[in-house]
Amino acid sequence: MTHASTPPVSTQRDVVTQAAERLQTAAETGVPCVPVRDLIGTDDVELAYAVQRRLTERRLAAGARVVGRKIGLTSPAVQKQLGVDRPDFGVLFDDMDVSALPEVPSERLLQAKTEAEIAFVLGADLADGPLDAAQVRGAVAYAVAALEIVDSRIAGWDITFGDTVADNASSGLFIVGERRLTLAEFEPLDVAMTMRLGGELVSAGNGAACLGDPLNALAWLARTAAELGDPLRAGQVVLSGALGPMVATPPGSSVSADLGPLGSITATFSGRDRA
């Protein structure tokens, strides 16, 4: 992977601010923006996460609360498509959880796509220690089926690694299922997933599609978050990554996914687009 030369610190601050403003304006107005890679490059990891942190700080200052993280780019096919060799992550805020709503509020989304995955809820911090497979497995209180409604503030999903990371890993909303299983009751690797849109099969996959095992994705995130000084904490939910291709879910659509032992989960999107 080729990295652009690092700009001076003052210039870095300027481009981070400009990129954050561009993405925030798109989110607030509902009008997708041009990519931010002209400002931060296509694969400058540090600058991309700096933009994400800037936007996170603004959300927190406005009263939002962090409830977990999402892992993206876990599929080898997607990594190859974007020309990257690593997953990424974004922040989950409390108002992104729409599990209790009768419909997914389409008016809050710009260009929604949905993917089915396993969500882990942590029963212990993942801050210290080796953060190896055994520790990560032991920290999981339970798992549930989840639908992640990904979204992009960038027009036409015209994204590179830098664009999606800056845009909070293309996060939108999420729904978690009600059936809770411990890791003593099932193996995430063995989960087979099918997803239907309006009754038509549109996506299928399994645990191996998520970095070889969804627990591998969780371990990667635990180590990465700890290295960045913002470790995963007990009570947080982690969306571990898609088990199959995502599908566009515009206003008025209905999508359902079956994740075997974790049961089925459904999302009906409101017929209202953004005003």
Image (cartoon, rainbow, N blue to C red):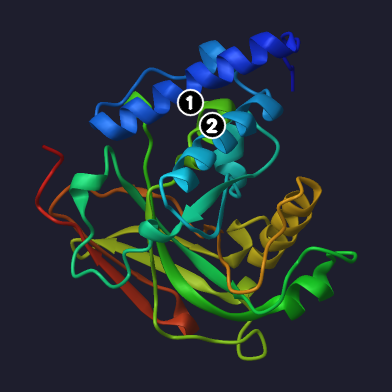
Q: Which dot, 1 or 2, sits closer to the camera?
A: 1
Task: Identify which residue is drawn at 47% across, 38% down.
Answer: 58
Residue that badge 2 annotates: 166
Is 269 situated above or below 54? below
Is residue 244 among what the camera can see?
yes
- Tell me the quadrant of the picture where the N terminus can be found: top right
Residue that badge 1 annotates: 20
Tag 2 secondary structure: helix
Task: Identify which residue is drawn at 39% across, 83% down.
Answer: 178
Q: Along the line of sight, which residue is nearer the eye, 236 or 145? A: 236
State how many labels appear.
2
Which of the marked residues, 1 or 2, is nearer the chain's N terminus?
1
The tag on residue 140 is none
Q: Along the line of sight, which residue is nearer the eye, 228 or 172? A: 228
Q: Are marks 1 and 2 in contact (CB under 8 Å)?
A: yes
x and y, in percent, of residue 39 in the image = 55, 13
x and y, in percent, of residue 29 in the image = 24, 29
Q: Along the line of sight, which residue is nearer the eye, 181 or 46? A: 46
Task: Identify which residue is drawn at 40% across, 21% down.
Answer: 22
Three-letter code, disc 2 = Ala
x and y, in percent, of residue 163 in the image = 51, 27
Q: Residues within 10 Å of mark 1 (few under 14, many from 20)?
A: many
* Horizontal side, residue 6 vs residue 175: left or right: right
The alpha-carbon separation of the residues under discs 1 and 2 comes to 8 Å
Three-letter code, disc 1 = Ala
